[in-house]
Amino acid sequence: MSARRRRMRDGGETVTFDFAPMVDIVLLLLIFFFLTSSLGARQTALPLDLPRASSAVKESPALPIVSVDPAGKVYLNGEATPLTSLGARLRPLAQASGGVVGLRADEKGQYGTVVEVMDEIRRAGGTRLALGTRLPAASGATP
């Protein structure tokens, strides 16, 4: 019986497994996940305490986002922007998004600055505002 086993081993072809295509696929998946995870981080780059709302809609990645922090500092897509140059920088982005501009402002922020930002958005061609909010707490507690 041992001679029969030897013949099968000696006469059969050796089976090999090529790891190169599998490594390529794993690297492509890794790159894909790195890219998609960094795109989602853009929306929450500023630590803002957004007001609560009972309904919320997810923001589109192509939507220009203007943020106002509690100190009244203005950001366009996560990049600090002076209020005086906000309109010029926002104009091409607002045209590309069809006039829709996202506005995220801290709940305890400066109301006057938010109104000035809204005026600049309107002057830059923003016809519709998508206001950033967060869902209420699941425990039913009032904010």
Image (spheres, grey):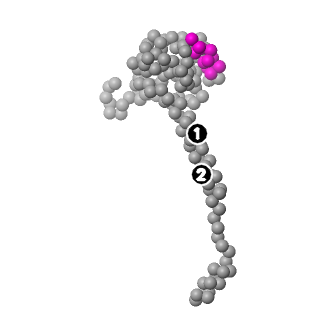
User: What secondary structure prevails in the magenta region?
Assistant: helix
**Who comes first in sequence, dot 1 or dot 2?**
2
Quadrant (top left/top right/bottom left/bottom right) for the C terminus: top left
Q: Which residues are magenta?
A: 84-94
**Are there few (<14), some (14-19), or many (20+) residues within 10 Å of tag 2?**
few
What x and y, as percent, mark residue 44?
Answer: 49, 30
Residue beneath label 2, please?
26
Q: Is residue 65 left or right of residue 19?
A: left
Residue 27 disc label: none
Q: Is residue 72 left or right of residue 143?
A: right
Whether residue 143 is visible, yes or no, is yes
**Looking at the picture, which amino acid does disc 2 mark?**
Val
Residue beneath label 1, please?
35
Q: How many labels, in total?
A: 2
At a point 60% along the width and 84% down the height, the residue shown is 5
Whether residue 118 is visible, yes or no, is no
**Looking at the picture, which amino acid does disc 1 mark?**
Leu
Q: Judge whether 54 appears above or below 73 on screen.
A: below
At a point 56% along the width and 41% down the height, the residue shown is 34
Does the magenta portion include 86? Answer: yes
**Are there few (<14), some (14-19), or many (20+) residues within 10 Å of tag 1?**
few
What x and y, as percent, mark residue 131?
Answer: 49, 21
Instruction: Using the image as rendered, state which of residue 39 and residue 57 is in the foreground.
Output: 39
What x and y, as percent, mark residue 77?
Answer: 56, 25
Residue 88 falls in image quadrant: top right
Query: For numbered disc 1, what is the local secondary structure?
Result: helix
